[in-house]
Amino acid sequence: MPILACGARRALFSLCVSSAFLVSAAVLQSAAQPAIAEPQVKTSEKFGKPMSEAVDLVKGRKYREALAKVDQAAPLAQSRGERLAVEQMRTAIYSGLGKQDELIKSLEAQLAIGGLPAATLKAHRQTIAGLYANKNDDAKAAALTKDLIKDYGGSADQFAYVASYELKHKNYADALAYANKAISSSKAVGKKPQEAWRKLVMRAEFDRGNLPGYYAAVEQTAAEHPKPEYLRILIERAQKDQRFNTRTHKLDVYRALEAANVKLDAAQRADMVEMAYSRGLPDEALAAMKPLAASGFKGIDASRVSRLKKMSEQISADAKGALDRHTARASSSGRGDAYVRLGETYLAQDDPAKAVEAIRQGIAKGDLDPGETAYASLQLGIALHHAGKEEEARKTWAGVKSDNGAATLAKAWSLMSKANLV
């Protein structure tokens, strides 16, 4: 017996149209006594004969012939059980024919007749709500779903459906309330909330202008579904911090984006080259330059290509002695920033253990200002992570406090670490 298809929208209703077939199956199994609600009822031969023939026709998927038999029997129905049996057969037939409007009327008729078992009553109400949603009558579907929630407590899918409806109509408070109920009810049974439900919260917070709430929702979504699209939002948020300095801090943003598997365009990669080199990190600049050169500097302005090509030779030359120069500078100056730069050089050369040692020395010098210390701690966490010391890395990132982007980036790195992305 065919079942009406359940599209993406219909998936919100747990039983979909198949609940109608729970009833139709019961009818088919009791062909001799088709009155489900009152199984002991005695029926007249005039009523029973066409109903029995209808059952056989439905078994053979001859729905139109079966409907004619049911219509023949309907005027002869005397008891509630007989009237219910008629509508149950119509439910099976209309479902087989794929006639949604008639199916809704048949199910609603069953509810009006009454006498249904509690489980069947609930299933029918869910199915009717789902059918209205399938017809794009969202207002009716949402109203019926709210009634289901009120009477039965609601399922995560039902909460999410109503949340989506309220969001569409810009009822942000209600949208958030229902979306959060979907999330909490899912977590209560040990299931990870669906990504779509998290996105409902994100969208509602953003559309109502609550940016702190929006970023908190993005963070929760990224923690459960660590995709580049969410991590990018969190990482690029660093640039909105009050004391973020594009000239000195943008390289750290690009580093985090790369770690999050966000694809950088050619211009951004060129920025990485120039920023890394200006920071005295030719090894990192050279690594950023290679894919650009391999592509023939595609996507880069011609005047910038010329500058990058000239830089390339100098970067390659400087990379050869970078570690020695930074070591000598740190030893001679004794300055914290020199040791931090030495640590970054070790990281660029894939020696995280020595990077950890150097950056710790730099922080211990005590001559870094709070903003510099925050970024040094960010780098220390990255070095610890690459050295395989995850717990210590996350503890270090958690301790980064700043309004210059470092704390925001540290939180993103911690999320990526927990998701095993870096």
Image: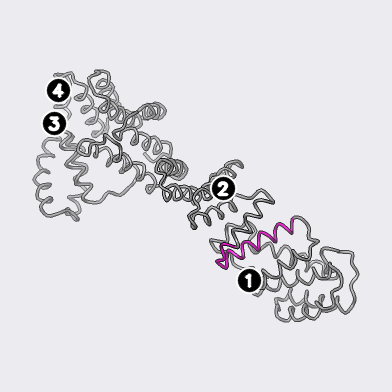
Quarter of the rendering occupied by the C terminus: top left
Residue that mark 2 sits on: 182
- Numbered mark located on residue 100 in the image: 1
Residue that mark 3 sits on: 321
How packed mark 4 is, by other alpha carbons closer than 10 Å (few <14, some 14-19, many 20 or more), is some
Q: Nearer the viewer, residue 350 or 156?
A: 156
The location of residue 273, given as percent across then percent down, is: 18, 42
5 on left or right of 29? left
Residue 392 occupies quadrant = top left
Instruction: State the CA–CA distance, disc 2 to disc 3.
Output: 58 Å
- Numbered mark located on residue 185 in the image: none
| Residue type beneath disc 3 | Gly
| Residue type beneath disc 4 | Ala
316 on left or right of 20? left
Q: Was residue 415 drawn as part of the magenta stretch in this picture?
A: no
Label 2 vs 1, first from the N-terminus:
1
